[in-house]
Amino acid sequence: MEKFFAAVRNMFQVPDLRKRIFFTLGLLAIYRVGAHVTAPGINKERLEQVWHDVGNTLLGVLDLFSGGNFRTISVFALGVTPYITASIILQLMTVVYPALKKLQEEGEMGRQKINQYTRYLTVVLAGIQTSFVAHWLQANGVGENTWSFLLTIVLTLTTGTIFVMWLGEQITERGVGNGISLLIFAGIIIGLPRGVQQVFERVRAGDPLQTLGVIALVIALVALIAFIVFVESGRRKIAVSYAKRHVGRQMVGGQQTTMPLKVNMGGVIPVIFASSVLAMPQTVFSAIPPDPTKPDSAWAKIFSFFQVFHGGDPYYELVFVSLIIIFTFFYISIVFNVEEVADNLRKHGGFMPGIRPGRATAEYLNTIMTRLTTVGAVYLAMVAFLPQIMLSGFKVGRLPFIGSQLDAFFTSTPGLGWIPTGMGYQFYFGGTSLLILVGVAMDTVAQIEAQLVMRNYEGFLSTGRLRGRRA
């Protein structure tokens, strides 16, 4: 701990690093101030009533990444969601559009051009999303059904999104880095005081079972965070050798190195994809409810099914875990092309000991990546599934054949009654939130440590270096 506190003191002794930290904190404060500025024309009481019915839909996912801004329809209601969507779209487009792929390979100039395209696409997506938000507000009586209200909401929320994107870029360039990620981090961490307050209220009640439940929840969260840190910093190192070759009159190469492959190369993106896909049906049904005069219609029956198809339902959890695994394999196959990596190694005179360059290298990498992706997919499914069960419960009564017996058993057994219902905490620390919080914290601390080491200061650890997800 002495090394850690010494590193914290050194952070503020380096003028440039101190300036970057205070600059980052200042922009994060501006972002949180904007969260309390509500868009004009909003009926707050009606909005609160509507939100009770749509909290489990895609709007709930949107509210998570906006840091609670969407719940109040502040000027930053969309947060960085359009920017994240635009970034993912362009990343996927590099696979199917050769011009973007070529631009990506041009180095810094190509990266700047892609960032410019990302900004343009962000503005377009923000305009489209804010139009839907404005129509949704009008349909639910949150705002006036006029063109002036529609135009005001679109302009206000789109401008807020552009400003948030600018804040993120400024933090990346002039702050400690990871600007967009830090904005998401700040939005999620704001729910910590509310969660701590709930925990203290449970302990203050004096119920021994409630106190044991709180202790179990804290232990589970600490263990889960430690597990996330362990996996996110995990690497599979592959030995790579470079043959000696003549470049002009000089002999270069002949060095030994390693290719580090992350265990969780997909990050939190597969979980976001799965959550968004599952939330879409509830979003559609909340916008188009069935006719109450026709309770036996097909639309009404589908609507009643999706009313219980949410977190904690066994069928929902099965589909959720399956989608996470599928999207993990899909996303990693896009961001890590084994044939391209093998071809680049061959062009630069690199090879893996005992593996022939070219196709054999690609097959070897594909075997390793399949195993790593399987471990990463299971890890993401566990991290997303376990906290959700603790918070929302697992409706064992919905299971076929043995559901009623299991429900009666858990309900009647002391200490297990929370399994069908959950622990009743309403804060953001689900699996997706924990992945984002821990990952961003690791990246930020790793960047600060790199700045300290570059200036001949010791890092946060007495031995070794702290690695982030991008290391």
Image: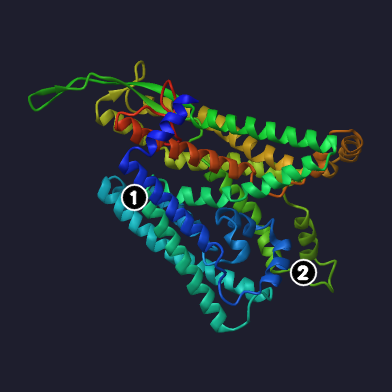
In the image, residue 239 above or below residue 85: above
Alpha carbon separation for disc pair 1 and 2: 52 Å
**SS at badge 1:** helix
**Residue beneath the point at 46% across and 35% down:** 469
Marker disc for residue 290:
2
Residue 445 x/y as whole percent? 44, 36
Q: Is residue 232 above or below residue 313?
A: above
The amino acid pointed to by label 2 is Pro
- Coordinates of residue 250 in the picture (x, y in percent): 10, 23
Given the image, on which type of amino acid does mark 1 rest? Answer: Arg
What label does residue 418 carry, if any?
Answer: none
Q: Residue at x 74, y 68 (%)?
A: 289
Q: Which residue is mark 1?
A: 174
- The kind of secondary structure element at disc 2 is loop
In front: 97, or 62? 62
Picture coordinates of residue 313 (x, y %)?
76, 46
Question: To which quarter of the image does residue 245 belong?
Answer: top left
- Where residue 122 sits, quadrant-wise, is bottom left
Give left or right: position of 405 versus 167: right
- The answer to whether one can see residue 366 in this image is no
Colour mapping:
rainbow
User: How would you rate the neighbour count of disc 2 (Cα within 10 Å): few for under 14, some for 14-19, many for 20 or more?
Assistant: some
